[in-house]
Image (spheres, rainbow, N blue to C red):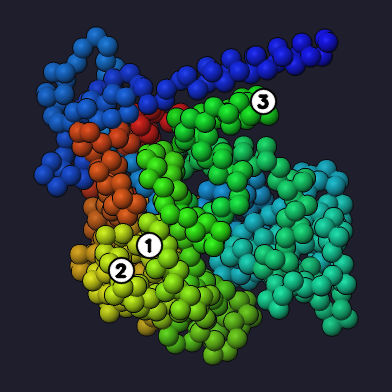
Amino acid sequence: MKRKLIYLLTLIVLLILGYFYISIDFTKTKATIYTNGTIITLEEDTPAAQAMLVENGIIKAIGTNKEINSLNSDNINVVDLDGATILPGFIDPHTHVALSAFLENMVDLSGFTHQTNQEVWAHLKKAVKTKKAGEWIVCKGIDPILVEDLIAPNLAFLDEIAPENPIILISQSLHTYWVNTKTFEKAGITKGTKNPSESSFYEKDSAGNLTGLIAEQKAFLPILEQMKKEVMTSKILINSTTKVLHEYAKNGNTTIVSAGITINDAKPLRLYEHLSTDKPSFINQLLATFGKLPQRTQNPRHFLYIRFDKAFLLPKEKKENDFYNIIGVKHWYDGSPYTGSMYLEEPYMVSNLTQEGLHIPKGYSGKPLINHDDLVSFIKEYHTKGWQLAIHTQGDIANRKVLQAYDEVDKQVDINESRHRIEHCVLLSEASLDKMKELNISPSFHTNHLYYYGKALKNDIIGEERANKILPVGSAQAKGIIYSMHTDQPMFESKPFRLIQTAVERQTKEGDTLGFNQRISILNGIKAMTINAAWQIHMEDKIGSLKKGKYADFIVLDKNPLKIPSSQLENIKIIKTVINGNVVE
Ligand SMILES: [Zn+2]
């Protein structure tokens, strides 16, 4: 009886807590005047303003200090910007929240933070010292391209470093894993375990013993299952998702787009739903599990392209939600330049890196992941069901073929209004750009390739001639194509000004210039990550520029990006991110 009473009381407390939580209407905020600033609106007819009145998440008025200050009354907050610059909040139109959360707590061994082989392993050894015996050590970012002298690890090496701990190293490309004996034991993998497929396997030496290398995800799955039980519990994943979403906002992103989430991955999906909408039953369930909940108002708007899945072949529901929504379907046509899976007209270069580091066979030029007829029927089926499509396409022949498929569908049903997308566009010919313009297909450029991997692309992977043609952002601009740019976090950190600087300067991190004639202006770089990205997701009437009636999603900067040399762009500080009128703390 007593136990029942306690249970009942707990339930009542939780319900009350839940009620209070959901009764906070996060769209209602006190009216605020932002005055005395330099506001870059990105609106053609009124590109500049000094002040704004924001109420309940919406820009109520925007104009000169005099115009807006005259609207002041007792109930209004006033924020003096003291000359600071305001920009519309950035929209990262292709990122991976779930994957970023998965990698969030891992030991970073990447080439972004380490220069040499010695640094990488010294960092790992230091990390091992902080762990208790038996504790998992999961590391990310192993990269033979950025860490040029990297010596790949193996089982014996990892056993020596961490004899008492299960250890996992994940490559930067996410295609290769290395583990030690303890990890194999945990997952029940022995030298007798069957390889899931020819391309996904447990590598063995000439004596038939495991080397510690695991190729591709299928073979890694038993380890992943074990990780989910011990190190990647849903509680940990929810915490890291919260952290990751907050980082996106702090980096100036007021809207993000997850490109390719699995529909079966219900937990993160439901979490995002909670973080963005009112779902009392789920909120109560989370409260019961976690006690305290992350603040929804601190998170960017979040839209999703669901990973292509036959089971999900449903017509799109007309569900309006400006905080969280599934907006389209993602497919992959080819792979990555750094695994040999980018599909090229001409083969990869034969170099030490492609042969020894990346194991790309001589004369290989990649291949498509889906045959032509299947691609055509995919596009037609999903387009007809009302979904917008985003197709991962990197190589020159890949882009040509995907556009050919779009074109074939367009001859049967008009696809012009859907703004279907092509993602990454590393090698995209002028003819392909013309086809895009004709079909109203919109590219999203993976511009950071040039800065981080430009040197390797030029010297070792595709050669100078092709490297000078990568990411033809300037040509897209000249042809009047609406394009966006993205960071593809966790591949690169979601820092928009770094990306814009690369598109403006076309410089690798070593300072070499690739494709000088493909430079764009700073203003066009900003548009690519604000109003153009909004257009790509059919939200240009609500976000992406600052105008009366649009959402109050903006960032406050310490410098005016239009008044500084391009080399200073990446140093701009985001003083404040405001989402739906709420300042992100
Ligand atoms: Zn991606």
Give residue 539's position: percent from left, percent from top.
30, 46
* Residue 515 visible in this rendered orientation of the protein: no
Instruction: Give left or right: position of 226 versus 489.
Output: right
Q: Are marks 1 and 2 in contact (CB under 8 Å)?
A: yes
Of 203 and 452, the residue lying toward us: 203
| Location of residue 39 in the rendering, given as x and y in whole percent from the top left corner | 22, 37
Q: Which residue is mark 1?
A: 384
- Along the line of sight, which residue is nearer the eye, 209 or 281? 281
Residue at the spot x=39%, y=68% of the render?
A: 380
Disc 1 versus disc 2: distance between alpha carbons?
Answer: 8 Å
- Is residue 151 toward the left or the right of residue 322 in the image? right
- Percent x, y for residue 443? 34, 64
- Residue tagged by mark 2? 413
Which of disc 1 and disc 3 is earlier in sequence? Answer: 3
Task: Name the amino acid, label 2.
Answer: Val
State which quarter of the image contains the N terminus. Answer: top right
Secondary-structure class at tag 2: loop
Disc nearer the start of the sequence (1/2): 1
Give the labeled residue for mark 3.
Answer: 288
The correct choice, above or below, for 320 with respect to 467 in the image is: above
Q: Specify the amino acid type for callout 3.
A: Ala
Crowdedness near tag 3: few (<14), some (14–19) or many (≥20) residues, C-alpha within 10 Å = some
